Every structure is written in C-alpha cells, then in structure tokens.
Image: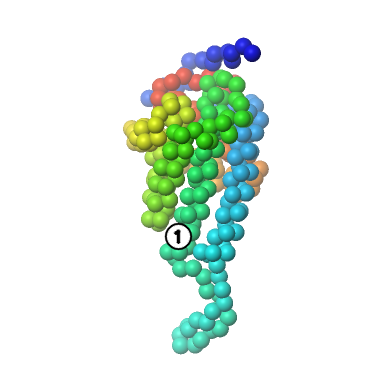
Amino acid sequence: MPPPPPPIYGAPPTSGSGYSAVAALQDGWARFTKSPSTLLVPALFVLIAVIVLEVVTQVILRATLLDTHSCTKTVLGTKITDAQCGPGFLTSLFATALAGLIVSVVVQLLGAGLIKCALNAVDGLPVDSGDVFGYALRPNVVSAAVIVSVATFVGTLLCYLPGLIVGFLTMFTMFYVVDKDMPALDAVKASVSLTTSRLGDTVLFYVLGLVCIVVGAILCLVGLLAAVPVVLAAAAYTFRVLNDEPVAPAA
C-alpha cells in the first residue's frame, strides 16, 4: 500500500499574531459542514462511551454517596417524620468531583484519538476513526490523562471555579502529547505557557467553546453531534495557528 500523500498546505489563514477565536470556530464550522462525517463518526464513538459511563457512574453514586433516605427532622421545634435526608454539601461536592474525575480520565484517553483526527483534518490529511482507540493506551497519553484529570478533580473540590481554571490552562496538553510526542509533564507546561502567553485569545476561545458545548447539550444529543466536532476542529486550528504552523484550507 503506498504511503498517504503529504498534506496540501495553503498559506496560513492568519498568523499567530492575528489569531481570532471567532475565526477558529468559523473554520471548525466550515470543516464540519463540508464533510460532517469526517469528525462526526469518531466524536460519536466518544459521546456514546461518555454517556454510558456517566449514567453508570451516577447510578452508583446515587446508590452510595448521594443516597437519600427517610428520616426525622426538627424544624422550629416541630418534629417532621418521613422527611427526605440526603448528603451534605461537602459530600455532594466530593461526589460531583469524583464523577468528574472518572469521566474526565476516559474523555482524555479517548480524546487523544479525537485530537489526532482533528489535527489531520486541519492538516489536510485523511481522518481515521480508528485513531480514537489507537491512542488511548499510549503511556504518554495515559500519564497526561491522569495528571489533567486529577488536577481538575482537586480544582473542583475547591468549589468548581479552580477546576475550570485547570481545564483552561491544560486544554492543549493532549495536543502536545499527540502532535509533538511530548512527555506528559512537558505537555502540561507547554499548554500552560501557550494559554497564558495568549491569554485574551485563549480565554475567549475557551469561553466560546464552552458556550457551544452547553448549547449543544441543551439541544440534547443532536446539538452535541454538531458542537463537539466544530469545537474540536476549532481547537486544532487554534493550536496550529497559535504555534505559527500552517493549516490546510477549510473549503
């Protein structure tokens, strides 16, 4: 079998100094609408796996840490029987963070292959859905997934906002692992360096990306089937352009 053709690069649509988060999402949308199945198929594999894992995790947590039961409470000196008692705030916060940790590890592992698919798309190379599973157990990928997920878990325990900050600072970690074959800690440092060196641009992209995912979630599975590939392609575009690397034309 002959080797795949080299990527056909056009001139970069913009340099790192002229990067636009809106342009990144427009590029992601253009790639998605041009060939919806290219990133939709691998993203669908991951979405199904995450949904199943999330349901199983919530069922287990609600039967253990988040269990409610009948009890007697005293309100203003009056005893109320058969009231529903449940976990306190700290227990609920821990359960939420624990569920996030479990799901995050799997998302990171399968997400490495998704990132490879997205990078191939913006590089003008063929996209192989098998990459979703082909990268999941690579040592650097596993290490990076654990580091990012545990850091996010700890951040979530500190009342959510630190978890979002960790997610922002490490959002390009797996890109560096997959694309540059960096060790996990080096990839984390590279991601933090990239996001903080272009803070305004990366914050805007992160917020817009979250908005797209949230809107997609509100519209149920159908919305996520469009939102995830678009944001994924936009992230790959962002990674390339902010590193002053070329991307193939979207159309």
Q: Give SS at disc 1.
A: helix
Q: Toward the viewer: 57 or 74? A: 57
Residue 171 x, y percent position in the rendering: 44, 38
Numbered disc total: 1
Residue 178 sits above or below residue 216 on the image: above
Residue 161 sits above or below residue 23 on the image: below
Residue at horizontal 59%, vertical 13%? 3
- Indicate the quadrant where residue 146 lies: top left
- Indicate the quadrant where residue 176 lies: top left
Residue 208 sits above or below residue 64 on the image: above
Residue 42 x, y percent position in the rendering: 62, 34
Residue 156 x, y percent position in the rendering: 42, 53
Q: Quick check: 57 left or right of 98?
A: right
Residue at horizontal 39%, vertical 52%? 154
Residue at horizontal 60%, vertical 36%? 43
Q: Which residue lies furthest to the top in this view?
A: 2
Residue at horizontal 50%, vertical 21%? 247
Residue 196 x, y percent position in the rendering: 34, 36
Q: Is residue 20 visible?
A: no
Amino acid tagged 1: Leu
Residue 170 sits above or below residue 237 on the image: below
Residue that carries the numbered disc 1 in the rendered image: 93
